[in-house]
Image: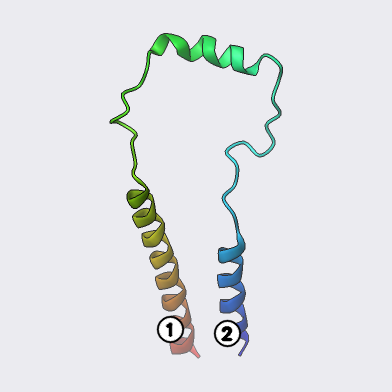
Amino acid sequence: MGRIHALLTGIALAGLAGPASACINDHESPTHEREFRSQYARLGPRSSKASSRTPLTNSVLAGSGVGLLIGAFAVAATRGRARA
């Protein structure tokens, strides 16, 4: 019974956890954007083809991640039963 509670708690936490910001503790400085532009402006524009992901691609990636997470929980649950 305890493992079921742990499994359900893990699933609930995974479902409720939102995406973390890239820089959680980063504070914007007044000159931040000007510094950023001065560093990266000389690189030129990137081609849009290199990093274009469609919403379908993002959904497939997210779905496969969820599938792997569910599979990991299933393996952990069956290994725990086999040892008991």
Q: Secondary structure at mark 2?
A: helix
- Residue 15 position, x and y percent, is 56, 65
Q: Position of residue 20 (x, y in %)?
A: 59, 47
Badge 1 vs badge 2, beta-carbon distance below 8 Å:
no
Residue type beneath disc 1: Thr
Q: Which residue is mark 2?
A: 4
Please tell me whether mark 1 sits on a helix, a strand or a loop: helix
Q: Position of residue 71 (x, y in %)?
A: 40, 72
How many neighbours does mark 1 have within 10 angstroms: few (below 14), some (14-19), or many (20 or more)?
A: few
Q: Is residue 1 left or right of residue 74?
A: right
Label 2, residues with CA under 10 Å away: few <14, some 14-19, many ≥20: few
Q: Which mark is residue 46?
A: none
Furthest toward the left, the residue is 49
Q: Nearer the viewer, mark 1 or mark 2?
A: 2
Q: Nearer the viewer, residue 31 or 4?
A: 31
Instruction: Determine whether 23 is above or below 79 in the image.
Output: above
Between 2 and 29, the one lying in front of the other is 29
Name the quadrant containing residue 74: bottom left
Vertical side of 33 occupied by 66: above or below? below
Give the amino acid type for the residue marked by disc 2 in the picture. Answer: Ile
Q: Position of residue 50 (x, y in %)?
A: 30, 31
Residue 78 tag number: 1
Hey, which quadrant is residue 78 in on the image? bottom left
* Relative side of 51 to 1, left or right: left
* Residue at position x 43%, y 88% in the image: 82
Q: Along the polypeptide, which appears first: circle 1 or circle 2?
A: 2
